[in-house]
Amino acid sequence: MTVTKDVIAKALQISPARIKEFHQSKNVIRVFLTDSQEVLNLNVDKCKPFIEQEQTVKPNTKKKTWGVVLVIFGALVTVSAFHMDTTVSTKYGSVHNIGLMQKQNNNIQLGGIIFVAGIILCCLGEKRSS
């Protein structure tokens, strides 16, 4: 069972910043506070509900962060592809170049795929990890 400062702080109803250090033995957690010489002994069983709550409530933030980054990057790639110039100048005026139009199409598709991948990661990041 992993005990963190946040779990101990919730169990003791204090700020995590007040905890200087803690040592866990089999049944007791000794907590040393920063603002006093007092040592608090905390029963491990008292922390179990807070540990379970911490594990079930914590969303996967890395997936969500990467999802947001990919959504923004995909949108930028797609918008920049729409603003690409696909014309070339000839002696008869400007005409659309098939190669440049294909490059524009590829960039639009790539931006769209990155955008959708970002949305999927954002949705997966919202789910609770167990």
Image: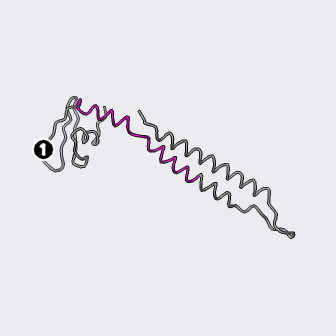
Q: Is residue 33 above or below residue 98?
A: above
Give the x, y percent position of residue 123. Answer: 51, 41
Instruction: Spot the residue most to the left.
Output: 37
Question: Quadrant where the C terminus lies?
Answer: top left
Residue type of the residue flagged with mark 1: Glu
Magenta residues, start to end: 45-73
| Residue under the image location 22 percent in, 40 percent down | 22
Q: Mainly helix, strand or loop, the magenta region?
A: helix
Question: Quadrant where the N terminus lies?
Answer: top left
Q: Which structural element holds mark 1?
A: loop
Give the x, y percent position of residue 71. Answer: 55, 50
Instruction: Spot the residue most to the bottom.
Output: 91
| Residue under the image location 60 percent in, 56 percent down | 76
Label 1, residues with CA under 10 Å away: few <14, some 14-19, many ≥20: few
| Residue under the image location 46 percent in, 44 percent down | 62
Q: Nearer the viewer, residue 88 or 116?
A: 116
In the picture, measured across the screen, residue 85 lies left or right of residue 119, that is right
* Residue on which disc 1 sits: 38
Q: Does the magenta portion include 129?
A: no
Give the x, y percent position of residue 48. Answer: 28, 31
In the picture, measured across the screen, residue 37 lies left or right of residue 99, that is left
In the picture, measured across the screen, residue 70 lies left or right of residue 10, that is right
